[in-house]
Amino acid sequence: MSERRYLIYDVFTDTALAGNPLAVVLDAEGLDTRRMQAIAREFNLSETVFVLPARNPVHQAALRIFTPGLELPFAGHPTVGTAIALAEEQGVASGDGAILVLEEKVGDVRCVVGFRDGANFAEFDLPKLSEKLDFEVPQEMIGAALGLGPHEIGFENHVPALRTAGVPYVTVPVADLDAAGRARLDQKLWGEIAPVIDGVPADAYVYCRETVNHDCHFHARMFAPKSGIPEDPATGSAAAAFSGAVLTFDAPPDGPHAIWIEQGIEMGRPSRIRLEMEISDGKAVSARIGGHAVRVAEGRLYLD
């Protein structure tokens, strides 16, 4: 019987029992895809990360990321949480920050980990900037799939769109906090309108300008039932895709921009995601996702 150590982190929060929980399985070499998927179902968290030796010896590790239902090429809260976990394991998460490169299926992801505002904080460069894909679905159909009226879909000049920065999402603006709070995804109706991109279903990322916390810029919820996640308390890959909506609809001026997104409030798992973009000539030339993470548990898997 083999033993494999694992860690549990709450991510996109500086407080235990908030944010998005993540399982990090260390020393995962020798586990095949079927076994990894079974372990992810056992943890039954929105994502489980398996840490493997890096192909490039100067990189920190290679990661495989699983929801309870499928493998993802990239995800934000596993990247933030694993970067902090590995930095803490090696005692380098302090001072001005340690630089780690994590190999994910989407590509190599550069992360910086340091101590900020009372807890370890990691941010990573998006390996792929947000891209808008073809998607033409009437607003009344999107509203019906979310249990909302067509008049509650969209605000200002924001309209729904299909976007990806490695993982596809339908970004759905809604009128206000009340509409966001009443959103309930009908899996059957959503399956009829949301495409599957490279084997990954496009999930629903609902957002509005009105927020609970005065220092946040957007309020968000994310529903991913086909991935085994009825609702996710914090979704970095969705925030990465959402950066394209900010660029398109808000047209920020050239220069650096920092945007805080709150999520998970309706679930009792409040989370804060930092989205940074560098704009030049009206286009995003780089973007980063960041957040805190705190260790809440560790243990061992006993496998035959």
Image (spheres, rainbow, N blue to C red):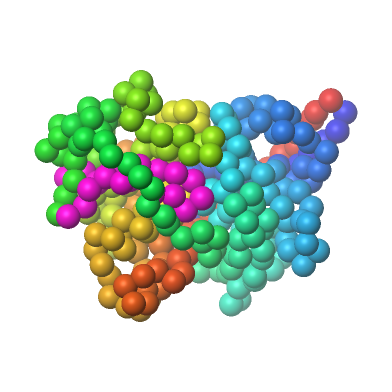
Task: Specify whether 255 is left or right of 12.
Answer: left
Task: Specify whether 227 is left or right of 263.
Answer: right
Q: Residue at x 47, y 50 (%)?
A: 237
Residue 70 rendering spot, x and y as whole percentages: 58, 32
The stretch in magenta equals 157-177
Q: Residue at x 35, y 45 (%)?
A: 134
Residue 40 rendering spot, x and y as whole percentages: 63, 32
Q: Quadrant of residue 293?
A: bottom right
Q: 75 and 46: which one is in front?
A: 75
Task: Specify whether 64 is left or right of 46.
Answer: right
Q: Residue at x 17, y 55 (%)?
A: 157
Q: In the rendered image of this protein, does residue 202 appear above or below residue 262?
A: above
Is residue 264 visible in the rendered image? The answer is no
Q: Residue furthest right?
A: 1
Q: 227 and 26: which one is in front?
A: 227
Residue 261 rendering spot, x and y as whole percentages: 35, 55
Is residue 25 visible in the rendered image? The answer is yes
Q: In the rendered image of this protein, does residue 1 appear above or below residue 20?
A: above
